[in-house]
């Protein structure tokens, strides 16, 4: 794993913000998967998860797989999941891969958190 990779989490009410920093590749995507699994599988579940991608420099197909698997697992537990603040090439890759057809891509974290709080829990 890159020494420049990190993941921070914080709670905003009943929404958890997960903020990876650096490149999401084969090694670091596994760390993201484990972090999301912990949040999704927590005994006291949250209403939603916002992935703050504002400091994600790049991502690869492993990251795409993690996003889809985490989205499905969260949905099955009644937890929403959105990606916020993706930039440039990362946003373009997410759109080319069709992620935006499955997972909402929000412009910023504040908007994503507000939307998550206002929305009904996924069924």
Image (cartoon, rainbow, N blue to C red):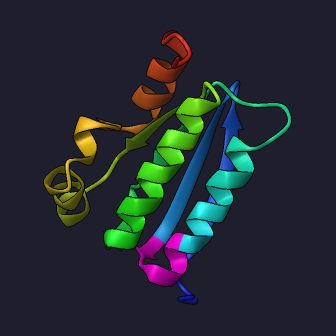
For this rendering, which residue is in front, 83 or 8? Answer: 83
The residue located at (51%, 19%) in the rendering is 122
Tally the numbered discs. 0
Question: Percent from the top left, x then y, of residue 61?
Answer: 32, 70
Residue 33 relative to residue 102: left or right: right
Residue 33 found in image quarter: bottom right
Magenta run includes residue 25: yes
Residue 30 found in image quarter: bottom right
Question: Percent from the top left, x then y, of residue 101?
Answer: 23, 37
Magenta region: 22-29
Decide: is 106 above or below 22: above
Decide: is 47 above or below 40: above
Question: Percent from the top left, x then y, of residue 104?
Answer: 33, 34
For this rendering, which residue is in front, 57 or 123? Answer: 123
Decide: is 80 above or below 66: above
Residue 50 seen in the figure? no
The image quadrant where one finds the N terminus is bottom right
The residue located at (80%, 41%) in the rendering is 42
Residue 68 seen in the figure? yes
Residue 109 found in image quarter: top left
Magenta run includes residue 67: no
Residue 3 relative to residue 46: left or right: left
Residue 8 relative to residue 115: left or right: right
């Amino acid at each position: 794993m890159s020494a420049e990779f990190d993941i921070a989490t914080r709670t905003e009410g009943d929404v958890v913000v997960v903020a990876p920093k650096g490149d999401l590749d084969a090694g670091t995507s596994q760390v993201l998967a484990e972090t999301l699994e912990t949040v999704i599988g927590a005994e006291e579940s949250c209403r939603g998860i916002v992935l703050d991608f504002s400091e994600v420099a790049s991502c690869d197909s492993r990251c795409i797989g993690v996003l889809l698997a985490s989205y499905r697992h969260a949905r099955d537990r009644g937890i929403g999941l959105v990606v916020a603040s993706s930039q440039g090439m990362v946003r373009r890759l997410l759109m080319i891969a069709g992620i935006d057809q499955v997972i909402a891509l929000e412009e910023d974290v504040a908007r994503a958190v507000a939307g998550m709080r206002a929305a009904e829990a996924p069924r």
